[in-house]
């Protein structure tokens, strides 16, 4: 007799999805940090656009996880109102 009860395949799938989602959020956060560093080094319209796109990707990923309160992102990432205003704007 097995010492462990059988695993529920749906639980296994959910755990895997949550893990992948967390990895994806981490990746989006690193890309946002990189874009913000680049913006601080070379203020340009092009880099502002890239940074706003990175912010948009990060916010969308958070919202897909059910994290809809973004009030602490400014503090966590050093975001500026300028980047928030540009988020989602397409040329």
Image (cartoon, rainbow, N blue to C red):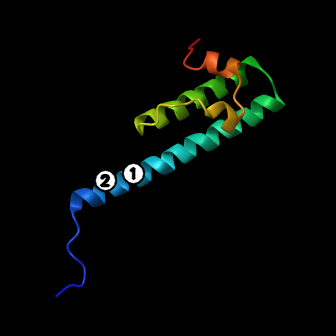
- x%, y% of residue 78? 72, 33
Residue 49 position (above or below residue 76): above
Q: Is residue 18 left or right of residue 76?
A: left
At horizontal 72% and vertical 25% (from top left) the residue drawn is 47
Residue 65 position (above or below residue 81): below
> What mark, if any, has residue 61 been given in the picture?
none
Say which of 11 and 52 sits in front.
11
Which quarter of the figure has residue 7?
bottom left
- x%, y% of residue 38? 76, 34
Residue linked to disc 1? 18
- x%, y% of residue 23? 50, 51
At horizontal 42% and vertical 40% (from top left) the residue drawn is 65
Looking at this rendering, what residue extends furthest in the right direction? 41
Q: Is residue 4 left or right of residue 69?
A: left
- x%, y% of residue 34? 70, 39
At horizontal 59% and vertical 20% (from top left) the residue drawn is 87
Residues at circles 1 and 2 in contact by the CB criterion of under 8 Å: yes
Quarter of the picture holding the C terminus: top right
At horizontal 80% and vertical 30% (from top left) the residue drawn is 40
Q: Is residue 15 left or right of residue 56?
A: left
Residue linked to disc 2? 14
């Amino acid at each position: 007799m097995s010492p462990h009860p059988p695993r529920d395949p749906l639980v296994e799938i959910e755990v895997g999805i949550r893990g992948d989602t967390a990895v994806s959020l981490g990746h989006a956060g690193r890309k946002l940090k990189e874009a913000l560093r680049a913006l601080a080094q070379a203020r340009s319209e092009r880099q502002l656009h890239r940074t706003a796109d990175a912010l948009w990707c990060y916010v969308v990923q958070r919202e897909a996880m059910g994290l809809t309160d973004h009030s602490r992102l400014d503090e966590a990432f050093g975001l500026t109102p300028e980047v928030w205003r540009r988020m989602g704007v397409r040329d």
